[in-house]
Amino acid sequence: MRKRKSLIKLGIGISSVMIVLFFLGPYYWQIISSFKPDNELFRMPPTYFPKQFTSQWYRLIFIKRHFLRNIFNSAVIAGFTTLICLICGSLTAYAVSRLRFRFKYLILGLILAFNLLPGVSIVGPLFLLLRKIGLIDTHSGLVIPYISFSLPLTVWLLTSYFNQLPSELEDAARMDGCTPFQAYLRIILPCALPGFFAVLIIVFISAWNELFFALIYTNSQAARTVTVATILLQGSYEIPWGPISAASIAMSLPIVLIVILAQKGIVEGLTRGAVK
Amino acid sequence: MVRPKTRCKFWIVYVLGMVSLLVSFILCPIFPVSGLAVEKTKLVLDLFEEHKEPMEHTVNKFEQEHPDIDVVLWACPPTMDEHWSKLATLLSAGESTPDIVNIDVIWPPAMASAGWLEPLDEKFLPEEREKYVVAMIKAMTYGGHIWAVPWYMDGGILIWRTDLLEQAGYDPSQPPETWMDMVEQGQRIIEMTNGEVWGFVESMGRDEQIVCNFVEFIYGNNGEIIDEEDNVVVNSPAGVEAAQFMYDLIHKYKVIPPAATGYMLEEARYVFQGGKALFHRNWAYAYGLAQVKGSPLRGKVKAGPLPKFPGGMHATCTGGWNHAINRNSKHKQEAWALIKYISSYEASKERVLMGGRTPARKALFVDKDVVAEYPHYPSYLESYESGVVRPVHPMYLAMGEVMKTELHRVVTGEKTAETALNSMADGLRKILKTFKVK
Amino acid sequence: MAVVFLYPTIATVWYSFNRMNLVMPWMKGFVGLCNYVDVFTDPRFWNSLRITLYFVGLCVIGSLMLGSGMALFINQSFKGRIIIRIAILVPWALAMCVVSLMWKWMYNDQFGVINAILMQLGLIKDPIGWLQTGTLAIHTAIFIDIWRNTPFVSLLLLAGLQVLPTDLYEAAKVDGANAWRRFISITLPLWKPVILVTILFRTIGAFNWSFDLIYPFTRGGPGNATEVMPLYVYTLYFRNLTYGVASTVAIVMAVIVGIFAVFYVKSIGIKGYV
């Protein structure tokens, strides 16, 4: 029995290491590249740890290229996208999941239709529309398309998460005298928290990492996101790997932070959900 | 089951809430860009981020001389395709900014035909045009008008390792005269280093670059893509030979890494920069980077004109970027004043000496001070004067697409040179036929 | 949202019935179904469709297998799983454009890390040209896509697992069901809706948005071997400048994805979902 347990533990250990290596390997490579000077970057055989440590790339992007402003822009845009998506999406999902009305399937299908056309065909007409409202090169100008991309996923996912919660929960709450909305806030939300945080991560990261629309709808530092700023580090011919690695690491750090916080939230949500 | 009344209320609240959230968000832009004084005319100039510093220097001086004009610099996407996508979206929507667009040498006919540019015939006079290389001016001209002023010029050059060439027993200061000479020298170095160092490297990925390479080979073999009477002659024997040579470089002579068919521009340069090739074909910037302080190749490289085929010419593909005026711009006079200032001899010279790219004016390449800083510039001018242009046609982008697909099929061995060029010629003819002038 | 969505959609549909070329703006004209005929008789369209279906198929299946395996694995309690949960999200945290370029350089034959490691381990003698042939190129692209998108799949599936009520499991344990039985009868049926949604959006993502992966990676090469539909549409829009035909292809893409969606929902059973 003990042998079996330790074998299982060993199996878990090895799998964990392999998983971490597989997913984190290239990221580690990016991190060390961001600290290598130019002549070491693509030397063969490659060095797996920088022989010469340099912070020049980080200095370049933060001091010369004002990368912090880009991080701020991305944070605002992604933040608002996530907020609006979660609020509207969860209410819609709740309605679809719990209420019974005739056009349920139609609404789900229509919302999905937002995602069916490829971005390239939407870019032009949408540009005309946003320009009329005067939203080019502003945060709102990007939040609006991003919401329309992320909303379908939010609604569909949250609907499926809500469906997994039995309706007896609300019945119990209603018997205690809650309105449906209160039932939603106090009972369903905490139980579906893992789902919420998962969607939060996905929507936030999708909005943060998007390139094509951000490239075309922003012209200056006013609303330029981190992805555009990273691409702009490229020269018309050159691809300076030092600054690009530094920028990609810098732009992924806020995401990693959000992920850590969200995972904590998930764990808390789980423990709280257990106490019903 | 929720009662209908509650359900109704729920939806009303929900919709109202969503609408108000959205409206408030739109009406209150967060941290708007600091407003400019209303009296000043705002000119927007579109350029590459990497050229910002030298250009800011010029622009600041311009603003001093014209206190009522404020120039804003927009960073355009660095790659050609992304840049084109952005400009196409903006200009086809009739945007008035950027006032001055930064355009590639192959775009003027397309943009002019689409009605996005302002003709510059009255402003960019013939006497001025003579100060630029013929090929550049040819690329800016379409439909009897001229559409842009060159900003900086570029062309393909051959870069080589002088130390390796000496080691192989050849004169390190002379580039090979013909392509076969280069092949021979390349094969020698491969032999000597046991395959550690390749003979030649250039980017043969499925991109605009492979078209540029092909242009150099075909014109170097006295061939043409589209002749003066608009006949497609790319699949002439000269053209087929040129394409066949590209294939042979990889598969017959084996002087270039076979994976070069997947290399984009920078990867090829890194192979050379990493010391793994003797010869390299690239734009002028690559030589500059090889000679920069801290580069392991500093002092060990030289640049010169590309080889030719026997009986042909030392052809180099003309590249570079140019300034044009947006047809919908609200400040065309001021925009022209700025372009004139930027392209003036003194301003251009300052930018070149500040570390900017190769200039566009011929005279600057042989200017005393410039040559003192960059002694190889006169040899560049020699190459650029025999520059050739890719077809000057509004549908060039579509043609380029056909060309790069077929050329890539040749170098990967999917099709023979003759078959591919015949398909290419068919494709080009079809495109020419679809284009009907107004 | 509807307004934002409606206008571009209607515009696209309208364009698809018109002949439009950006550099010949005087040549606008309603051509009815001509564009559709052109598209369906173009071998390049069918080539692109075939490649895209293959690409999407392998990507979705690959990330589903890997993702669900990892979700189940992480759902067990063991020490240090927080680290794993954060680690697996890292590929998703990097932007696709950066990921694509990064992998391309890692795969380079002369100075790429992958060949270096393989040669140092003695597994290969000469560097492999990963992007040299169409087959290698497309499979390399699929691998990168799976690497980057499995976190998405596993995150959603994991959340789906964690929302499952635990008392069902306890009841089953009391009844004497073993782990496999519990998996088949409790986990799988309740998990199905989440799996559906995840696959659906993964398919939409791979079908419509794989541009960011393929374009920096191979630009559609060698030849046209990795030309997926988003890249093909992009070429039609911005290189051939034929907005009419491009819009037609866009509509066709939307319809195809729509068919997928209907197929998925039907196979899981819409009743099982709502």
Image (cartoon, grey):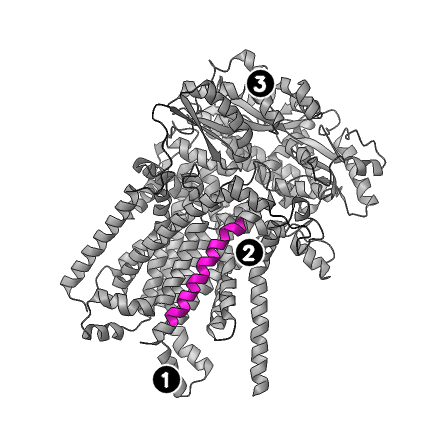
In screen coordinates, is B249 left or right of C198? Answer: right
Q: Amino acid at mark 3?
A: Glu
Please tell me if label 3 and label 2 are on a single chain. no
Give how far apart the Cα atoms at labels 3 and 2 are: 50 Å
Q: Quick one: label 2 or label 1, which is nearer the N terminus?
A: 2
Q: Which mark is residue B346?
A: 3
* Residue B319 x %, y %: 59, 29
- Could you tell me what secondary structure mostly forms the magenta stretch? helix
Q: Which mark is residue C171?
A: 1
Classify mark 3: helix, strand or loop.
helix
Q: Is residue C54 visible?
A: no
Instruction: Name the residue at 15% across, 66% down.
Output: B3
* Residue A203 x %, y %: 40, 55
Q: Is residue A249 magenta?
A: yes
Question: Considering depth in this image, is B43 or B200 the residue closer to the camera?
Answer: B43
Q: Amino acid at mark 2?
A: Ile
Q: Which mark is residue C144?
A: 2
* Residue B217 x %, y %: 67, 31
Contact check, label 3 and label 2, Cβ < 8 Å? no
| Residue count near mark 1 (Cα–Cα under 10 Å), binned few <14, some 14–19, many ≥20 | few
Classify mark 1: helix, strand or loop.
helix
Please state the extent of the stretch shown in magenta in the rendering.
A248-270
Quadrant in which the C terminus of chain C appears: bottom left
Classify mark 2: helix, strand or loop.
helix
* Residue C173 x %, y %: 41, 85
Closer mark to the observer between disc 1 and disc 3: 3
Q: Amino acid at mark 1?
A: Ala
Q: Is residue C192 magenta?
A: no
Instruction: Name the residue at 63% across, 17% down.
Output: B363
Instruction: Name the residue at 40% across, 20% down.
Output: B68
